[in-house]
Amino acid sequence: MSNPVIGIIMGSQSDLKVMKEAAEFLDEIKIPFELTVVSAHRTPKRMMDYASSARGRGLKVIIAGAGGAAHLPGMVASLTSLPVIGVPIKSSNSIDGWDSVLSILQMPSGVPVATVALNGAKNAGILAAQIIGVTDKSIAKKLDHYKASLQRKVEESFKEIEDKGWRKAST
C-alpha cells in the first residue's frame, strides 16, 4: 500500500479493540493509514512530535481515540491544522464513557475536534474517508458503493419481514 493519508492513534493499547474498527473500514476501501499508540499523558513529547509532523509526513486526517479524561484528540488538534476526529472510548477508569465524550466534545473555540459516538471508531473511519473523498474521486466512488450497500441491507430486511406476512407499511 502507498504512504498513509490517515493516522489512527489511541491513548493506550487497550483502546485497540475499539479503534481497530476504523482501521478495518479503511482497509476495506483501501485507504492507506498508520496506527499507533500516542498517550497525551504518558508520552506527551511523542504526541507533540506526531501531531506537528503529521502534515509533512503526508497525513490528511487524524483519528484519535481516548478514554477517561480523553485529552489526546484535543491536544493533537491544538498542534496541527489537519482535521482531527475524536473517538471517545469507554475505558476501565471511565464514568460510563461520559467523561470521554464530554472531554472530546467540549473543545474551546478555535480548536475543533469532530466527535463521533462513544466507541464509534467505524464512523470515525467513514468520516475520515469522506474527508479524503472530497478531493479523491476513487474514494468517493467507494463510499457511494458502501452507502448503497447499507441501503440494500435495509431493503432486504424489510422485504424479509414483509415476506413473513406481517403488515406491509404504506409508502
Image (cartoon, grey):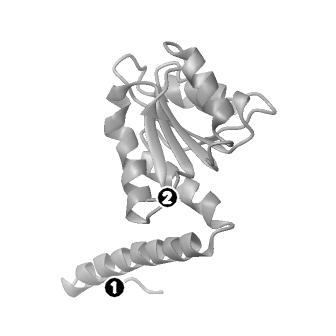
x, y percentage for residue 37?
44, 29
**103 and 162: which is toward the camera:** 103
**Position of residue 114 in the picture relative to residue 94 (left or right):** right
Query: Which residue extends farthest right?
Result: 110
Q: Residues within 10 Å of mark 2 (few under 14, many from 20)?
A: few
The answer to whether residue 102 shows anywhere in this view is no
Query: Which numbered dot is residue 168?
Result: 1
Q: Report the amino acid beneath label 1.
A: Lys
Choose top left, top right, bottom left or bottom right for residue 158. bottom left
Q: Residue at x 48, y 56 (%)?
A: 32
Query: Which residue extends farthest top?
Result: 42
Query: Helix, strand, or loop for circle 1?
Result: loop
Q: Report the amino acid beneath label 2.
A: Ser
Q: Is residue 78 above or below residue 130?
A: above
Q: Earlier in the sequence, mark 1 or mark 2?
A: 2
Q: CA distance from mark 1 to mark 2?
A: 49 Å
Query: Helix, strand, or loop for circle 2?
Result: loop
Q: Residue at x 43, y 66 (%)?
A: 29
Query: Which numbered dot is residue 2?
Result: 2
x, y percentage for residue 132?
62, 60
**33 and 41: which is toward the camera:** 33
Query: Which numbered dot is residue 5?
Result: none
Q: Residue at x 43, y 77 (%)?
A: 151
Say which quadrant the N terminus sits in: bottom left
**41 and 70: which is toward the camera:** 41
